[in-house]
Structures are given as structure tokens and as C-alpha cells.
Image (tube, helix red, strand yellow):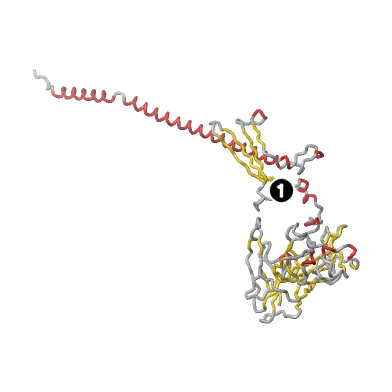
Amino acid sequence: MNRPPLAPITASCAASRAASRAAARQRGTTLLEALVAFLVLSLGMLTVARVQTQLRLNSDVARQRSEAVRLGQEDLESLRAFSIVAASAASGGARSYADVTSAASSVDSAAGYAINTRYRVARQIDPVDAMNPNHAPNAKDAAVTVSWSDRSGAAQQVVLNSIIAGSDPAYTGALGVARGGVPVLGAYGRSHRIPLGAKDLGGGRSAFKPAPSGSVALVFDNRSGLVTGRCTGINPATPSRDLQAADLSACDANIGYLLSGIVRFTSAAPPDPAQAIEAPLAADVALALAGGAYPNPPVCATEALKTVSYTPGGGTASLRIEAVPLAALPASVGVAGWVDSGDRHLAYHCVVYPLVNGQWSGRTTLLPAGWSVGLGAADRRVCRYSADLDGSGAVDTNLEHPATYANVDGALAHQNFLVIKGSETCPTRPGVRVEGHPADVYANLSTAQHQP
């Protein structure tokens, strides 16, 4: 009997033993992979927890910072809540501007605030720098620092700065309680329409000589600024500042508006509107009215003036700059001497009596005396200082000195002219910032053709 061959059986056993050895080598791999996955998951969870903690910390700091800003603003507003400027025995304990001083306090939940930390509010008050033109006088610099510690123990703070003005609180409602139709008063408690050089006569009236060496004086109502009378027979040697009620005897009772300005002259080529200080030529101002039957014709006066500076009272007062007649001497203002600036110009003042609706319209012109208006080399051209002051893109209001006025219902000042050679053209200039002025104040010396 023959036996089957043994070779296939031997090969199968060898394969089984090889598979057993491979399985032995792979034993524990699954556990290692599980441990690695657990480690990665743990690191991820720790990172998420760390981010969540940081987010909560940042959110808490942001909320605390908002609360600190509110506390600082609250403290600043409390400084402005004074009701009087200077404390006195009769003030009854009312808060005053003098009480605005440096101080410090603490704010926490024990004081009734729903907060999760303790704030320290420190206020530093200093007088403003009087040499700084950006600071208003009679004011105090206030710096409020609010500091605290966040939940991580880190120090945090915000600082708020402001200026506390020492203005009387009684003035804060002045514009709100002013009666409609009544103008707000200007310098010296009078209407801003009254020339600064007018003499206050008392009783709500002021007087002003349009020509310092003339014999005519105008009487103004201090509250409205209207011209209420034109008086003649005034002593030519009496300046406006020395006028008395007794000097005003021959006066009419006509109500009018004041129209005023200056005329400058230059023969430079090309003309410079900022350097027109030559001696003025003789001229009058005429005003042709339009639009109705006016109760009285306008009355205009001109006088050549020079600008001088002096210190009244023998040096005990501040420097004064004034326009005086060309022939005037220092004794006319009561001083031993003055400094002549070299500036010369022609000043004019017109009283216009309006229609029954309180308005007037018309055009002003220069009437030369001994010279001619024209375009030739021997003639003179008249330009008017005129510019778009309100940024509307055109000279479209009476204050901007148009060629012809329309529906004027009040006084007009600074309606100035420039007289140049007839062969030159009226100069234009861009608006420029006034040097040394803290605010954004601009001057515009542009001119426009007016005559011929």
C-alpha cells in the first residue's frame, strides 16, 4: 500500500508557524494607537479650555474697562455741576467752581455698585497753561484716572482728560431765554452793530462821530443798534469819547441803519491788497437806492485817517491802536507821543433810512475829487474787497460785499474798497490762516471790479 506524499503537509505547517510569529510581533499596537489618540484629544481639550478661559478674561476686562470709563465720565461731569463760581457765606453750601480740586475715592460693591472688582478713581486738577494759546483763560485741566485689578491680578487703568471752564453757570441759558427779535448784546453790553468807539451816554443810548473832525454825531439805541438820530452842530474838536448828552441838541428822530467801511489806495504794479497803505485821495461815497420810495435820502461822510499806537495813562494801561485824522497830534488823545504805523486810509459811514418793511437795496460808488475813474494809465480803477465767506460758491449775501445790495435789514460793516491804477486789474488772493490765532480763522483779501 502506498503512503501519500508528506511535502504539502510540511509546507502548510511552516506557513502556520510564520503567521503565528507575525501576530506575536503586532501584539499591543492597538493599545498604543488608542493612547496616542487620547493624548491628542487631551491636548485639544486643554487648548479649548485655555482659550475659553482667556476669552472669559478678555470679556471681563472689556466689561470692567467700560465700567471704568463710565465712572471717569461720571466724575468729570460732577466737576461741571457747580452752580456758582466763587463760594461765599451767602451761597448756602452750593457747589462752586472753587470746589473743583484734586481728590481720590474707591468704588466697590459695598458702595452699592454691581461690580466684581474694586476701582480707584483719582482726580488731578491743575490750572491751565496761561502761555498756551489753545487753552481758554479761567479754566482748569482735569485728569481722571480709574485703576483696578482684573481677575488675573494684572493692573488695569483708563485716563480721561478734559478742561473745566470757570464760566458762570448763569450764562448757559442766555441764548435759550433771549426773546425773539431782540439781538444778543456785544461789547460793552451794547448791540454789535454799534461802532466800538461810540460813547455810551447812559439811558440806553450811545453817540458816535462818523468823521472825527466833523460836526455831525449819530445816536444809537444800545439794544437794537439802530441809528435813532443824527445830530449837527457838534464841536469839530470834540472826539466821540468826549461826547455828552448836552452836546446833542440839534438832532432829528429818523430811524436808520449804518453802512461803513474803508477805502485803501495803492499805485503799486501789480497791486497788493494787503499792502495798500498809501495816502488816500479825496473822495466821497454815494449810495443809489432802489426798490421803492424811501422816507429820507442816505447821508454819507468820509475822512482820511492814519493808524497810530500809544499807551494811555503814561504807561499804566495796555497798548491801544486807533485810527485818527491825518492832521491829529498826540495831544488829541491825551498822550505825549505815539507810534505812527504808516497806514493811511479813507473811512466812510453812511446812514440809510429803510422802507416801511425795514429793508433797503442799492449800490455804493466812489465819487472822486481831483482824480478820475477809468481804465487808462492816468486813471484809477475801484475794486471792492469781496469774497465767498460762507463757502456757497458765490458772493450772494450782503455781508460778502456784492456789487449791489438787496433787502438789507440791518447794519453792514467792513464794506471796503481798493483803489488801484486804471491800467491794472483787481487782484485776487486765496484765503489764508491768520498767523498766531489759535482758532481756524481765515482772512480773504480777494477783490472784484466795481468801477468803472
Q: Position of residue 141 (x, y in %)?
A: 66, 45
Quarter of image, res 10: top left
Q: Is residue 182 left or right of residue 68?
A: right
Name the residue rendered at 74%, 61% in the picture.
311
Determine which quarter of the picture holds residue 265: bottom right
| Residue 397 showing in the rendered view | no
Image quadrant containing the C terminus: bottom right
Question: Hey, which quadrant is residue 157 in on the image?
Answer: top right
Which residue is at the far left? 1
Where disc 1 sits, the SS reads loop
Q: Amino acid at mark 1?
A: Asn
Q: Nearer the viewer, residue 393 or 427?
A: 427
Q: Nearer the viewer, residue 102 or 63?
A: 102
Residue 158 placed where, x, y %?
A: 59, 39
Q: Image height check: is 210 above or below 27?
A: below
The location of residue 91, given as percent across then percent down, is 80, 39
Q: Quarter of the image containing the N terminus?
A: top left
- Residue matched to label 1: 138
With respect to residue 90, does 206 lie above or below?
Answer: below
In the picture as drawn, the residue positioned furthest to the top comes out as 1
> Does residue 267 lie above or below 257 as drawn?
below
Where is residue 319? Give x, y as percent. Answer: 73, 60
